[in-house]
Amino acid sequence: MKTGFVTIGGYGTSNTSVVSKRHHCSCLCSSSRQHKYFYRAAVDVDRTRLGGKASSFFSTTVENKSTKQDVKCRPLQVFMGPKQIVFKEDSRNALARGINAVADAVRITLGPKGRNVVLERSYGAPQVVNDGVTIARDISLSDPLENTGARLVVEVASKTDQKAGDGTTTSAVLTQAIVNQGLKIVSSGANAMSVRRGITKTAEYIVSEIRKVAKPLRGQEDIRAIATIASGGDQTIGSNIAEAYARVGENGSTTVEESQSLMDEVEVTEGMELDRGFISPYFVKDQERQVAELTRPRVLVTDSKLSVVQELVPLLESLVKSKEPLLIICEDLTGEALSTLVVNKMRGVLDVAAIKAPGFGDRRKAYLQDIAILTGATYVTEELGITLDQVTVDMLGRAERVVVGKELTTIISTGEHQEEVKKRIAQIRKEIEDTDSQFDREKGEERIARLGGGIARIKVGAATETELKDKKLRYEDALNSTKCALEEGIVPGGGTTLAFLAQKVPEFEKTLSDEDERLGAQIVGRALEAPLVQIATNAGKEGYVVLNEVRKKELGWGWNAATDEYVNFYDAGIVDPAKVVCWALENAASIASMVLTTEALVVEIPEKKKNTSSGGDGMGDLPGESYM
């Protein structure tokens, strides 16, 4: 019997572990009960070990819960399942069938008259959605060959969602159009690699043209228009997002949360909000509200743990003389340092409050640096050679107002260090662009919001859970589109920008010397018309009739699917973020061109379900015995 080889951790054959489904353990497995336990334990241990480097064979010790004996187990071995391989046109056609299956389900949601898709749930109510990437992720096809193509649509939609936060349906429609037209060209004998180069070059050209025609946002009305379009035409969502941005600014943060009521509400927190409260309740001044409020306090920012009061005495004496309040942000405050501050606070000698630094590890360091920049303080850390006994009043920052509660602290900036804050925000934005981690991006946006001076929380209400989930997805799409529009500007929406720029492709095609590359350019040119055609089709119109009418007009004019009129899109507020359109095209061209150059497809053959009516659990280890 042949044993399949599995590379552990991606390091190649030197770290390859031979594994098989059959488990063997030592002779202490004298009963089916023990054997059941040892099997489970070995599976768990081996799963853990297989997550990283592993030697060719290893053994591990597990404990029998009933006998408290240690048992030496041999490695869990897993035979890799048989594979199915298809080549050439069969592989590409299988991928195309999967792509079409998902894209057909997604594209019906495009535009203001796009329809909904109902997703079955194994528990709870079905989910009614109008979000492309959510629909794509929920689809799994029974044919493994076609399902691989379906996963590619999920990939292109997810990448667009990750980079732009919206435009997932457009990217799916573009991918489908490029793949279907490209397959016809490749099947007729064109060189797939040359066609791919033509697709890539043309997509890059169109992206550069999109950025050239993009216009900056003109104010709150443009924000309302962008949010309304991205939410599927919901005026309430557009108005709430415009209100949120008006109150916190473009550097503030807007989040979407579920509400307990039926109405949507916008709540705003001004200043930098930290999820840390007072270290000691003796710092509280307002007993009714349980907060310590400091007016124009000095701010000490350090990553040190304060326990010895002598280090702070010269600094505290200076503050007592100047009668200035003090906020201390540190790793911790304990011992005589804490008791001394509390006593002086209660006696009215010094108005002081202390909180622990937010975050952990490197993220804590970043938060403290943010606070130092916002308040104009020197970041006191031994890493920079600055100790507590060296701190002077000049090294302290200043805030306009600080409110310290039991669990939250809000710092209102004086506004004296805006240039440094802008540079810091630009640095954080660069870090967000460079990371692939969704968690790091969210934390980066959170830091920008804290520095920007406010957080707006949109609380979404609905009568049913199904409606609530759908509204929340629409809000998130609208928010992401608004962020993109603020970054790179806006272009006419409704697919008209892509359709207009498609007319420039023949001119660009002349710059390509290779005939097959020119065929790739033609593929992109025709695919650029697909979003507009689909929007018209979803609205019950003949797509190519609408397309021909739009071609006669200049950029900025198009067909309003909501009113069935040809209007100036800028005046009507029908606009898309340039960044969303660019990423949708770039990702679609990338995935589609890879499909066209595919020559073989390898998938695992699904195992036939075993008959477990004899009482086993389907594992095939000891037929007839229960392992549950």
Image (cartoon, rainbow, N blue to C red):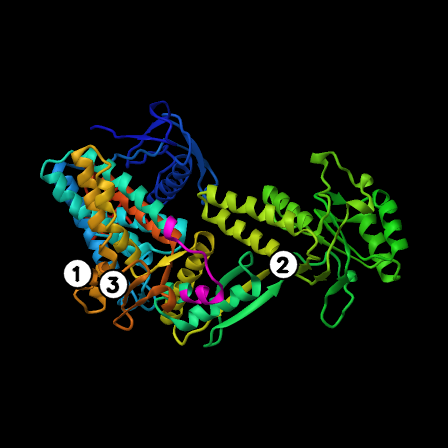
Q: Position of residue 570 (x, y in %)?
A: 37, 64
Q: Nearer the viewer, residue 593 or 316?
A: 593
- Tag 3 and tag 1, C-beta contact below 8 Å: no
Sooner in the amino-acid sequence: mark 3 or mark 2:
2
Kind of residue at badge 2 = Glu
Please report the residue visible at 28 percent of the width from the left and 73 percent of the height from the top.
Answer: 563
Kind of residue at badge 3 = Ile
Indicate yes or no whether the magenta region holds residue 219: yes
Sooner in the amino-acid sequence: mark 3 or mark 1:
3
- The residue sitting at the left extreme is 188
Q: Nearer the viewer, residue 442 or 490?
A: 490
Quarter of the picture containing the N terminus is top left
For this view, does 589 lie left or right of residue 351? left
- Residue under label 3, please give it: 535
Query: Which class describes the residues within 10 Å of circle 2: few (<14), some (14-19), or many (20+)?
Result: many
Distance, label 3 to label 1, CA atoms, is 11 Å
Q: Which residues are magenta?
A: 212-225
Q: Position of residue 592 (x, y in %)?
A: 24, 44
- The residue sitting at the top extreme is 14
- Residue under label 1, please give it: 544
Image height check: is 63 above or below 625? above
Which secondary structure, mark 2? strand
Q: Quadrant of residue 436?
A: top left
One can see residue 600 in this view: no
- Residue under label 2, please give it: 273
Distance, label 2 to label 1, CA atoms, is 52 Å
